[in-house]
Structures are given as C-alpha cells and as structure tokens.
Image (cartoon, helix red, strand yellow):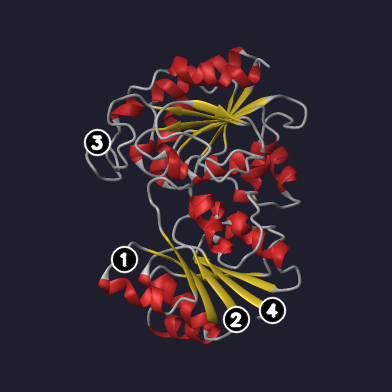
Amino acid sequence: MPPPNRILLVIMPLIGDVILATPLLRTLRRAHPQAVIDVLVYQGHAAVLEGNPDLNQVLEVTERPRGRELLDLFRRLFRHYDLSLCNSTSDRKILYAVLAARRCITLVPAPRWQDAWKRLFSHGWTELDDRYTHTVVQNLRLADLLGIARCYEVMVPHTEQSLQTLGDLLPFNPSAEPYAVLHVAPRWHYKRWTHGGWKTLAEHLIHRGLRVVLTGGGDEQELEYIGAIFTEMSTGMSNLAGKLSFAELTQLIKTCRIYVGPDTAITHIAAATGTPTVALFGPTNPLKWAPWPHGYAGNCPPFPKVGSRRINNVFLIQGEGECVPCHEEGCEGHKLSSSRCLLELDSERVIGAVDTFICQ
C-alpha cells in the first residue's frame, strides 16, 4: 500500500487529551515527513498545538455541530484524506474519522452490539484499556497498527513572542531571578488542594529565595480562588492567572526553578518541558493519567497506581486513603465536590518533594 499523502488525526475531547496525543502526532510525522497532517479538535483547544512542527493545519469543531456547521464540516472532511486516526471511542468522533478517509484506524470500546459498526468500518482498531494503560501508550497503539516506530515525546505549545510578554507582566526579570510556578486552581473542584496548603508551600519557596508566580485559567471562579491566596500574602508573589496563552504559560514554566500543580493539562505541559514538576494527585488513576516525564520512553506506565514516586523530572504526590485512587469525581461523585484525599494532603509531604529538586 502506498504511503498516505494526507492524514487526519481526530483528537477529542479535553485539552489534556490533545497534549497526550502529541507523541502519536510526532510518530506520524517521522514516518511520513512529506505528508500533509491535519488535526481535528474541539473549538478552543487549538492553542495547545501552537507552534507544533508536526502538523500542517488544525481544524476546530464545536462539541455538537448542527445545521450549516455540520454540513460545512462534512464537506471539509469527506474523503479528503488517505488515512485517518481517532483516539476516542465516541460515536461522533469515530464517524468523523470514517467519513474523512477510506482507510481509518480507531480506538474502540469493549465489544457491545451497538458499537459493532466501529470495528466494521475501521481498517484497524485497538481496544480501549481505561485502567492499566497510560494514555500516551494507548494512543501509540494506533501507530502500531500502521507498523511505524513509536515516538514518546510530548510536544508543548511554543511562540517566539512569549519571553517579551512575560517580561512585560512580571515585576522581576524571569531570565535573571529564580522563581517557582504554582498552578493552584484546576477547572474542577475535586482536583483541588487547600488554600492553607498552597500558602504554606508559597511561604516555604519565598523563604528559599524564590519568587512565586501563580497561574490559572480565566474562569471567574478560578480567578476568585487564586485571588484569595494572592491577596492574603502578596509579598514576593505575582498573579498571572488568566493573563497568558498556553504558549506563554509554557515559556513561563520552561524557565522556572520548580512547578507545582494538580491533575490538570498544565501539569502535563510542565512535565513535558523538562522542568522539575511536582504533581498533586487525588482520585485520578496515575496509571492512566499521570504526567509523562520528560525523556521517559517506556511501554509501562511511569507511575504505579498507588503511592508517591519520582521519575525523571516529575515527582507525583498521591493523597492518602484506602480508597485512593477511586477513579471518581470527588467524594460526592460530581465535578464540584471535594476530595478528602487532597483536603488531608499534608503540606510537609509536598514541601519534601519540592526540596528534592530545589536543594540539589
């Protein structure tokens, strides 16, 4: 079979999924350096692919396109590619991939009669393992079906303008003074640590001679959460929450002394930059979703299901409790609930992990 000239990679649904699919994208680029490789993502997620050298074009679509938007998407995709790949088991996403190319490689769910069409219309498929296989490796199994060599490198967003932006926003020179980045507010409450924990950690970092920069998204609730920490102890701290693009935030993390954050897409980016990274995990399964350490190239998950450990530049701290990880959305089972394993996470454990990096 001749090599494909045009390839579409369908990546859904979350920003973290896009980041952890970049090793697959790089694998495709190295195997087919002359091909046109496009990526289809949800609207608003293209920013994490800024500056990525492995793609030609990013296509964006709303979560549930209707009417004219759906018709336009169909026209743009239908048989426009020689090969398509989909790393989601969703009906809609697999349908996009099937329509886009005559040859389609997909991720499929466990066998059920209503999903039989996904295997029928795919020229190759691998079954989702949602418990024991890391997402990076799960994605690369799609490449295995094509018989091409795996690449395990997670790529981060990039722009040449980011250093100038940081210099304008910070009250110190980020190229000359050591600083730490604390990403304190994930989108969902059940992934949050405590105000007291973050403040104790910030005080420790300042005592160690580091500036502290707080980061976060532009959501109103996130800004309020971060602002409360910043207001209570603003000396030695800067608040850039909601002020940076993904590429600018990546540059901020690349040049910092230490990054600390929860289970969020930004922590995946931090790990990929090679910056010393401390990741705070509660209910989430590390086997599946732990940050992928810089330089790690194994087929086994880098971190175990239970326990805290350092691998390369990433120190994963897991909350304690017999139920951890429960794989649930907090103790109440919804995104706005809290997680006892994180609420009870001792700041001294986090400080100890941080000191393994900054005291070297």
Which mark lies nearer to you, 2 or 1?
A: 1
Along the polypeptide, which appears first: circle 3 or circle 1?
1
Estimate how packed mark 2 is, as few (under 14), some (14 to 19) or many (20 or more) residues with alpha carbons within 10 Å.
many
Residue 339 quadrant: top left
Residue located beneath label 1 in the image: 111
The structure residue drawn at horizontal position 40% and vertical position 53%, both measured from the top left corner, is 129
Please tell me whether mark 3 or mark 2 is closer to you in this view: 2
Mark toward the start of the polypeptide (3 vs 2): 2
Q: Which mark is residue 1?
A: none
Helix, strand or loop status at disc 2 = strand
Closer to the observer: label 4 or label 3?
4
Q: Which mark is residue 5?
A: 4
Residue holding disc 3: 331
- Categorize mark 3 by other alpha carbons within 10 Å: few (<14), some (14-19), many (20+): some
Image location of residue 223, percent across then percent down = 44, 40
Relative horizontal placement of residue 81, taking residue 183 as reference (left or right): right
Asked if one can make out residue 16 in the rendered structure from this viewpoint, the answer is yes
Name the residue at 56% across, 57% down.
Answer: 140
Name the residue tied to disc 2. 81
Q: Using the rendered view, name the quadrant where residue 192 is placed.
A: top left
Residue shown at the point (46%, 14%) measured from the top left: 348
Mark with earlier residue (4, 3): 4
